[in-house]
Image (spheres, rainbow, N blue to C red):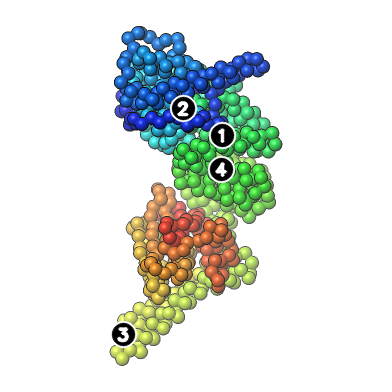
Amino acid sequence: MHDVFSASSQAEPPLRRRVALPLAAPARPGIVLRPGAGTGAAQAAAVQACARAEIACRAAWQRVCVLGADGLLALARYPGDGVPASAPQATPDYGAIAAEVEFVLAHGVRPGSARALVLLAAVASARFGAGASARAVADAAVLLAIDGAEAAAVRRLHVALVMARHEPFSACLHVLGPAGAEDAPAALLRASLRCAAGASLPETLHTLEQSMDGAGDAAACAENGARLALLRALVLPQQGDAILAPARSFGAWVLQLQLAWFGGRRSDACRAALAAAPLADALAAPSVLLGYHLFATLALAWEAAPRHAHALRWHRAEIEAAAALCPANAGAMAALAGAVASAGAGDVAGALRGYEAAAGLGEGYGQAWLAALAWELAASLCQQCGFGVAIPAYRRRALTSWHACGAHGRIARLCHGWQEGAPAAKLADIAPGPAWPGAAQQDEARRVARAGTVGELGVAIAHEVNQPLAAILMQAAAARRWLRRTTPDLNKALDALEQIAVSGRRAGDIVRSVQGLAQRHATDTTRFMVDEALDEALRLLSRTLRKHGVSAELSLQLSGCAIHANRPQLQQVVINLLFNAVDALATVEGRARQVILSSRRLGPGTFEISVADNGPGVAPADRERIFGALFSTKQNGTGVGLSISRAIAEAHGGHIEYRPRMPHGALFSLVLPAAGA
């Protein structure tokens, strides 16, 4: 690995120091000390030398752990001058690292000692299973640096090789501080962390272009050129395939692997994955190493050759080990690698569930690019298996996720590929959505109802109209009671009659809405206040809630937010969810029955309406099917309420999803774009 951390003039605060240094665990398989290239006797000699270096590193690490962080900080300065020949240079030699640490422990600290200590901590973290002890030694190494320039360089090593194994990449970026004029290795580190953390790709491209000052070793400059080519291919719509110089380092091979995979060049991707494998050593930065394991998994699974089975297991094991250390960095990758393994084993349903789980984790951790990859792979799997109905939804979500991270070049490539592989009429199914300039906002996929046959349409209309009809009967009974009193209460009777009129109009709106969804008519939109519509929907069900002993809570945070949408349809979604919550709460005993209707902004482009209850929730086995047509968990349910709700959400460019609520209950979330707000 080249020296990624040269001097910096910026003063940086010291990292938190830890004192307890337990001895390291046994060596973890997979990540190795790199033996180097060669064949025959030379390769055997290199392997033996590497084994001796590992023994030396382990012995040095055990001595460091016995001394402890306070003992390291108490070491005296070595009175000699200069950096000795045995100190680690630009390409780390593990024997030299161990030798320099032994020198430090015996004679004191000199220039290069702090760097050797942090490199040893990185080896211990990757190879010996050290966690808190490795971070404590790296913290101490920063404080042991001879001057500010060395401290900044050692700090960057700490962030790249030690902290990034245990802390989210976003936290590592925070420690690095704002970008400025940086040499090539420092700019490369920042770019790799930003990409892995899920930062905006156009911003990362701009930062990398602006911050590079050209200084640094040749390997780092070559990697930066490859990183720029990858970012430009993803961000710029008219960018063609880049022609890169032959890779000479692990990072360069990884970037060539990613470029080949995104460019659809299978043989090149497999070649890069195999070429990088012997270079994936204990001092590879986790932000680069995880990308390697993920894209090597995708490339080798792409080829589906039996000879890659062992390598695929290794890549997946390394991703899962990283996810165990820091789920925010590798949790979505682990789910994605598991889904790829399921697809390779022929478990299509398990693979699709895995891709959806990976996409959810990616979105949850802010890694939109991982969510986009997962949706892409799900669409590709459906295409291979002939699941034509599911392809448009997966493709649309892939485009939405790529749009979220600014990958306009990737979007253009995907749309071009899908245009060649499908009739133009079918491509309307994957139109991106209302937030995209020029998109067809009422495309076929967003308008299709789950009631596709005449019989199912009848069931759907009966289900939807049944709710306002029930409200009409209830209000009529209330009006009779108020009028039959000895002294009739005309005001309350008139209120009940007004609610009857409102429910009657809503029944007509529902019939037209369901018919429009099924016949693919354009959705009639009006401008209305979101929170007012939600409050009105809840008031329509107030008597039903009281009758079933359910308390309702409003948490509306969209005051003053007006949108252009179909008001009756959105209210119907909310009412469906509220009725489902009431039905679920009917079995609850021993605790108060509660439902919460809330609204909030998710960001500048989206808002969320949610209905939560404290009922029994949805069984795990049913969670994948609850939005399907004619599927119901109720004994006498019709199975169209959630199906139509999803169709309405998609007709407005949004989506609806279920999440379990802890410790009890369910939460249904309707996420919509704030176009026209």
Q: Horizontal and vertical percent for residue 167?
A: 42, 36
Q: Is residue 339 visible?
A: yes
Q: Picture quarter containing residue 262?
A: top right
Q: Sort mark 4 into few (<14), some (14-19) or many (20+) by Cα contacts within 10 Å.
A: many
Specify the quadrant that holds the C terminus.
bottom left
Q: Are marks 3 and 4 in contact (CB under 8 Å)?
A: no
Q: Which residue is mark 2?
A: 124
Which residue is more in the foreground, 247 or 422? 247
Q: Are marks 2 and 4 in contact (CB under 8 Å)?
A: no
Q: Which residue is mark 4?
A: 336
Alpha-carbon span between mark 2 and mark 1: 20 Å
Which residue is more in the foreground, 313 or 208? 313
Mark 3 or mark 1: name the one nearer the start of the chain. 1
Mark 3 or mark 2: name the one nearer the start of the chain. 2
Report the residue at 46% width, 55% height from top: 671
Report the residue at 45% width, 30% height from top: 24
**Closer to us: mark 3 or mark 2?**
2
Alpha-carbon span between mark 3 and mark 1: 74 Å
Q: Picture quarter containing residue 417?
A: top right
> Which residue type does callout 2 highlight?
Ala
Q: Which residue is mark 3?
A: 489
Mark 3 or mark 4: name the one nearer the start of the chain. 4
Dot 4 lies on which element?
A: helix
Alpha-carbon span between mark 3 and mark 2: 82 Å
Q: Is residue 386 left or right of residue 324?
A: right
Q: Horizontal and vertical percent for residue 669?
A: 45, 57
> Which residue type does callout 3 highlight?
Asp
Q: Which residue is mark 1?
A: 293
Q: Are marks 3 and 2 in contact (CB under 8 Å)?
A: no
Dot 2 lies on which element?
A: helix
Which residue is more in the foreground, 74 or 610? 74
